[in-house]
Amino acid sequence: MKQAGPRLWGEHIDFTINHAKLLNDVHFKIDDGSFTGLIGPNGSGKTTLLKTIYRLYTPSRGAVYVDGDELHSLKPRNAAQKMAVLPQEHTPIFDFPVMEMVLMARHAKKRAFEMDTDEDIRICERALRRLGLYEMRDRNFLSLSGGEKQRVLLASVFAQETGLIILDEPANHLDIGQQLVILDAIKQQPRATVFASIHDLNLAARYCDRIMAIKNGRIIAAGIPEHIITAPMMQELFHVEAAIEREAETGCLHIRYIRGTAV
């Protein structure tokens, strides 16, 4: 992991909707070149924070910065050149072949009405190969399984070729094999800074360089996994008694859940 300072950061972020404050004075920094995981219970503000970062929501107060630019002041095309996003839900209105889906990610790099180039095609084919999808490039997106669709969407993120990738539960609802394929590909993406909400805490401990914990719309802790994935934090965030162990095979932290406790 590089230590070149933050690539993405937020200051004093509030988000209020229908008189409910979903984010409350959030501060965060995502180091350049890191894979940072966002964890927290359901309703804690994970998706709200990510939607604020990728401009679906506008903060009620505060600001988000990428590479020193205030993100919400950028034009959409400029923002897309800096940041690629994989939201939690993505339902295309129209069906397209897989290759066309991935080529759409190249539009942020082009002028209006500019045609796809041989280089665009090479970049997209490389992304598909990395995710084991090259042989499916002519299939229609809606004919694929859930795991295959998620891999296509991740290939689009890679083909966009930004230095910053925002992911909302990229491996949720997939079988363990698909989860590992997707997270291995994300971890190995060259020169990428990744910020992802992750539901499975053992996957977060395995793949993330740093972890941020959010509760009731506030970031309550941030640091390396060993400092955040602890029994007291599992109790505070999720109301579970847990034992934290280290896997002999991988050296990664592993959470063994013992019992739920009263809220």
Image: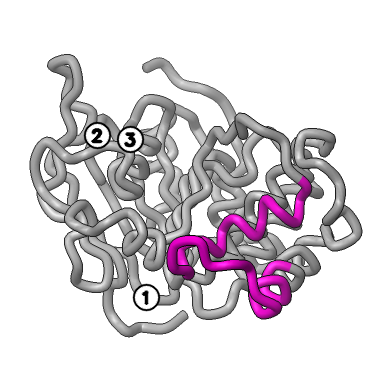
> Measured along the vertical axis of the image, is residue 53 above or below residue 236?
below
Asked if labels 3 and 2 touch by Cβ distance under 8 angstroms, the answer is: yes
Q: Nearer the viewer, residue 117 or 46?
A: 117
Q: Nearer the viewer, residue 137 or 55?
A: 137
Q: Find the distance from the CA under tag 1 to the CA under tag 3.
A: 22 Å
Quarter of the image with the C terminus is: top left
For image coordinates 76% across by 41% down, the residue present is 141
- Which residue is labeled 3 in the image? 48
At mark 2, the secondary structure is: loop
Indicate which disc residue 239 carries: none
For image coordinates 27% across by 79% down, the residue present is 5
Q: Nearer the viewer, residue 118 or 71?
A: 118
For image coordinates 41% across by 56% down, the residue present is 211
At mark 3, the secondary structure is: helix
Q: Residues within 10 Å of mark 1 (few under 14, many from 20)?
A: many
- Which residue is labeled 2 in the image? 217
Magenta residues (range)? 97-124
What amino acid type is highlighted by mark number 3? Thr
What amino acid type is highlighted by mark number 2? Gly
Residue 18 lies, in percent from the top left, at 18, 15
* Residue 54 covered by magenta stretch: no
